Image (cartoon, helix red, strand yellow):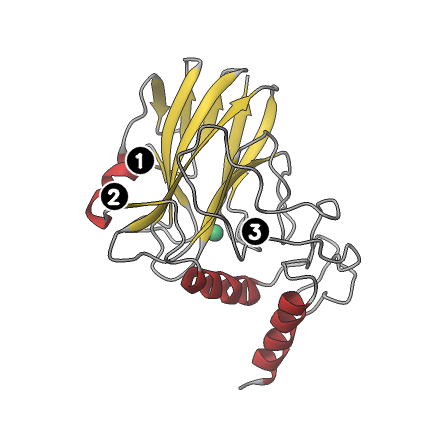
Amino acid sequence: MTRLERILSAALAIIVIGGGGYAIGRTTAPGASLTEPRAAGSAASTTSTTMDMGGGSPTTGPSGPGSQPGSSAAGYRNDALATQIAQQEGTQLAADSPTYTPAAQTRAAGEATPTGATQDKAADTVTFHTDTVSFNAVSVPPGGPDMTFRIAGLVNPTLVVPEGATVTVVFINADTDEAHGWEVTAAQPPFQFQPGTAAFAGAFARGLGDPTVAGDGTETITFTADKTGTYQYVCPMPGHAQMGMHGAFDVR
Ligand SMILES: [Cu+2]
């Protein structure tokens, strides 16, 4: 074990021990949880487990004791630690997904053109024109690129939805060895290690783990985009928004 690996192990131990959650670099209010309430009417029945941020100490911010290699004024960043956490969660959450998408169907899900939407491939934008919005979001899609979402055949596209739209997202984690999630947040780049809470009630798909024989972990969420503005959809796993897992979510 190299010196760096010892430091990372120590940092991970601090995270795991310190309040049972990923408290490093958090910008959310004390007591906030990554496991936000499920959308009403969701068929999912499993309970969340290890993504619970608990009531982690609010003192472990960018300048707190959890601040290890990579700290800067721009915010804590440690890609190696983020990867270590996501790999651990990927294993732990593998059997915990609400549903699964057969692996052979995942690529098509990421390519599917949503109903009622227009695509501008040059601008990497998908614009929805109806009050009911539905699309698939595939994390770390087959064929890459790594640490991105594929939506409507585009990589991290800007999504534009009408104010008040009811938005349904089928989130599929296609990564073979890391947990990922999907969330709409008001936070903007450059992101903190922990990118922030959901901007709309229910606009949060928790981390889903590694694939199983049943396929790729899948969760369907529904929320109302009830306030205009420019938001971001991100992976809520620590460090992943910083590593490129984000795109603009415009409510007009
Ligand atoms: Cu991720």
Q: Residue at x 59, y 47 (%)?
A: 34
Q: Residues within 10 Å of mark 3 (few under 14, many from 20)?
A: many
Q: Amino acid at mark 1?
A: Gly
Q: First in sequence: mark 3 or mark 1?
A: 1
The relative height of residue 9 versus residue 201 in the rendered view (above or below) is below
Contact, mark 2 vs mark 1 (Cβ under 8 Å): no
Q: Nearer the viewer, mark 3 or mark 2?
A: 2
Q: CA distance from mark 2 to mark 1?
A: 9 Å
Q: Amino acid at mark 3?
A: Gln
From the top left corner, tell me how far across and down residue 246 is, in percent: 50, 42
Q: Which residue is identified by label 3?
A: 242
Question: In this image, 75 relative to 207: left or right?
Answer: right
From the top left corner, tell me how far across and down residue 142 is, in percent: 28, 50
Q: Residues within 10 Å of mark 2 (few under 14, many from 20)?
A: some
Q: Which residue is identified by label 2?
A: 107
Q: CA distance from mark 3 to mark 2?
A: 25 Å
Task: Note whether ligand 1 is within 8 Å of mark 2.
Answer: no
Label 3 sits on a secondary structure element that is: loop
Label 2 sits on a secondary structure element that is: helix
Q: Amino acid at mark 2?
A: Arg
Q: First in sequence: mark 3 or mark 2?
A: 2
Q: Residue furthest top?
A: 130
Q: CA distance from mark 3 to mark 1?
A: 22 Å
Q: Nearer the viewer, mark 2 or mark 1?
A: 2
On residue 71, the disc is: none
Q: Which residue is identified by label 1?
A: 153
Q: First in sequence: mark 2 or mark 1?
A: 2
From the top left corner, tell me how far across and down residue 239 is, in percent: 57, 55
Q: Residue at x 37, y 50 (%)?
A: 140
